[in-house]
Each structure stands twice: as C-alpha cells, then as structure tokens.
C-alpha cells in the first residue's frame, strides 16, 4: 500500500510538472520569440540569464504553490490577498486578470501566425480552430487541462533536445561571430522580469491545481520538477537560437531553425509548436474561468462560450506586435510578485 501511495504521489507530481511546463511554454517560448526577447538578443550574457531564470522558476514555482495550498486559495485573487494585503489586492487582481487575458490573446494570435506562416492558411482560420478546440477541452475542466499538457510537454522536450544535438553535429553551435555579449542593465534585469512575468501568468493555473492536489509533497515535487525541466528547455532553445543567423526575420524562428537544419521533422515540429501554444491558451482560459466564477456564479459551459467570444473579438491583432509590447511591460510589473514571494512567510501547515 505504501509503494502504491508513493507511485500515485510521483504520478501526480509529474502531472503538475507537465501543467507547469505547458503553461509557461506558450506561444512566445515554443516559437522562440520570447526567448529571443528576454535572452538571446543579449548574446552569451543571456546564457547567464537563463540559469538565473531557471533557479527562480524552480524556487518560485514551489513556493507559490505551497503557499497557495497552505492558505487554501481557490484562485489567484485569494493568493493576492495574502501577498499584497486586502487594500491592494483588488487592484492587483484586476491588473493580473487583464494581463492573463492579454497574454492569452497573444497565444491565440500566435496560433494564427503558425497557420499563416507555416501552413499558408488564413490567420483567422487558425484562430477559429484554436478557439473551437479550447472550448471543447474546457468542457472537461481539470481533466482536459492535465490530458493536453501530459501529452504535449514531453514532445517539446524531445524536439528541443533533437534541435540542440543537430546544431552541434552541424558545427554551428554558438559560433564566435554570432555570440555577442550585452551586459546592460536591461540584460541584467531580463531573467528576473521573465521569471516574474511567467510566474504571475502561471499562478492562474497553479493556484487551483495546488489546492486540489492530494498531497503537499506532490505539489512541491511537481513544481520543482517543472522548474528544472523549464531550465533545461530554456537553455537548449537559447543555445540553438544563438546559433541561428536569421532569427529576427521570423515570427516563429524555431520552426525556421528546424526547417533549415532538418527538414524531415519540420511538419511534426510545427504540430508540437501549435500544441504548446494551445496548452497556454487552455491554461489562460482555465485560470480566467476559475477567477470569474469567484466573481459571478456562471456555469462552466456558458463561461467557456463567453471567453471564446471575448478572445475572438481581439484576435485581429498581430502576434509579433502584441508580444513585443505586452511581454516586457508585464514582466517589469510582475517583479513585485517575485519580491513578495520572497518576503512573505510560508504559513504553517
């Protein structure tokens, strides 16, 4: 019985890790744009930034989830109340809800970019398909969220490793002419704003999952496993993009990397990129739905339809434009969350 309990605990930990990874690896990460924006543009200095972000993901994810579980938070609003206090928390929750909605809109625009750039379909066709699939998965609630992430996250790990090995074999890994170094203040702040931003976005999913998990050890292990996997993925993708000379010319540079270095796997990789974008769309909508239910007693089906209609209305915006403006801005705003996670004491069990 004890062995069975341990197996269940580890199984749940891996599921939590997959959701954590799948939520963070969205449109920006999977396509490579986000990694370029926060790390690769700073050259080898960005490699140090990746290591710093990895530590913050592992420590911050575990602390956030354990803290949320111990205070019994059902949504990120309740965690914000503990972190920011009753006076500030309503404003913070409102801003965070707008941030999560904005980032989910970026993900949906990213799905449209995949269809337009890689398949040659109209962008709106990709957006419509994504919203339709998202509504379908939301009907299954938490099971749908786990099911999609457990399948897609390992695929991203596999393809990132393949891309890295292929780049080494081709002899193109971090050639001196491509490895510029930028140690500006912006480069130094970048890993902190990146980790803070992603933790702020992921808490919409991580908070309810932490509360609904059967055991705190599974929560802690899942968060730490997720943080370590994210670190490895960040490093692999950053090194590959650092070696690719034309990365700034594309909305989806990682797909072009695969197309350039090994065409055989190109279409499969496009599917994986789309899958990762889709997991973040689901994560954003799942978190928003949980928060809206705190404010208004809406049924799951009607809430799903309402969110789909809302995101359909903002879908005409272009992915690259949205990402370049929204991500750095939200990253700096989220630094306060990272600081408070460090400052606030963990409640006793």
Image (spheres, grey):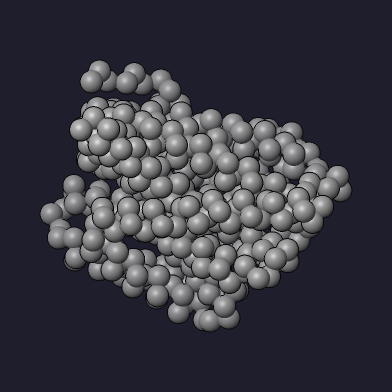
**Which residue is drawn at the image coordinates 53% and 46% (left, top)?**
329
User: Observer-nearest residue: 1 or 330?
Assistant: 1
Q: Position of residue 331 (x, y in %)?
A: 51, 42
User: Observer-nearest residue: 67 or 298?
Assistant: 67
> Can see residue 276?
yes
**Which residue is drawn at the image coordinates 75% and 39% (left, top)?**
44
**Outermost residue, bottom direction?**
121
Q: Where is residue 93 in the image (x, y as percent from the top left)?
A: 32, 42
Q: Say if 178 sits above or below 138 in the image.
A: above
**Which residue is drawn at the image coordinates 46% and 75% (left, top)?**
126
Q: Say if 80 sits above or below 346 in the image.
A: below
Q: Quadrant of the N terminus?
A: top left
**Which residue is drawn at the image coordinates 47% and 43% (left, top)?**
198
Q: In which quarter of the image is the C terminus?
A: top left
Q: Position of residue 251 (x, y in %)?
A: 62, 64
User: Observer-nearest residue: 75 or 90?
Assistant: 75
Q: Say if 244 sits above or below 222 in the image.
A: below
């Amino acid at each position: 019985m004890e062995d069975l309990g341990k197996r269940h605990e580890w199984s749940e930990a891996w599921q939590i890790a997959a959701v954590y990874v799948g939520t963070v690896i969205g449109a920006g990460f999977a396509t490579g744009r986000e990694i370029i924006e926060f790390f690769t543009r700073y050259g080898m200095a960005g490699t140090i930034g990746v290591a710093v972000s990895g530590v913050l993901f592992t420590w911050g994810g575990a602390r956030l989830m354990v803290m949320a579980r111990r205070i019994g938070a059902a949504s990120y609003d309740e965690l914000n109340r503990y972190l920011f206090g009753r006076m500030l928390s309503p404003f913070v929750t409102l801003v965070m809800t707008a941030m999560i909605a904005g980032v989910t809109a970026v993900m949906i625009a990213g799905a449209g970019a995949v269809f337009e750039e890689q398949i040659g379909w109209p962008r709106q066709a990709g957006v419509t398909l994504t919203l339709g699939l998202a509504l379908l998965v939301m009907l299954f609630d938490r099971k749908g969220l786990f099911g999609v992430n457990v399948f897609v996250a390992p695929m991203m790990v596999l393809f990132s490793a393949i891309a890295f090995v292929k780049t080494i074999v081709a002899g193109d890994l971090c050639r001196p002419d491509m490895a510029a170094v930028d140690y500006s203040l912006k480069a130094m702040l970048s890993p902190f704003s990146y980790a803070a931003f992603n933790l702020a976005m992921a808490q919409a999913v991580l908070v309810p999952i932490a509360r609904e998990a059967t055991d705190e050890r599974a929560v802690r292990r899942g968060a730490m496993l997720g943080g370590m996997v994210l670190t490895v993925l960040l490093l692999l993708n950053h090194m590959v993009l650092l070696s690719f000379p034309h990365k700034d010319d594309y909305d989806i540079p990682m797909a072009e990397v695969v197309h350039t270095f090994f065409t055989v796997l190109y279409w499969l990789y496009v599917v994986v990129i789309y899958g990762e974008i889709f997991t973040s769309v689901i994560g954003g909508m799942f978190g928003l739905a949980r928060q809206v239910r705190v404010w208004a007693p809406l049924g799951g089906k009607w809430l799903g339809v309402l969110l789909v209609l809302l995101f359909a209305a903002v879908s005409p915006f272009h992915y690259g434009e949205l990402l370049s403006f929204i991500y750095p801005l939200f990253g700096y705003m989220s630094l306060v969350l990272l600081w408070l996670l460090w400052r606030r004491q963990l409640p006793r069990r």
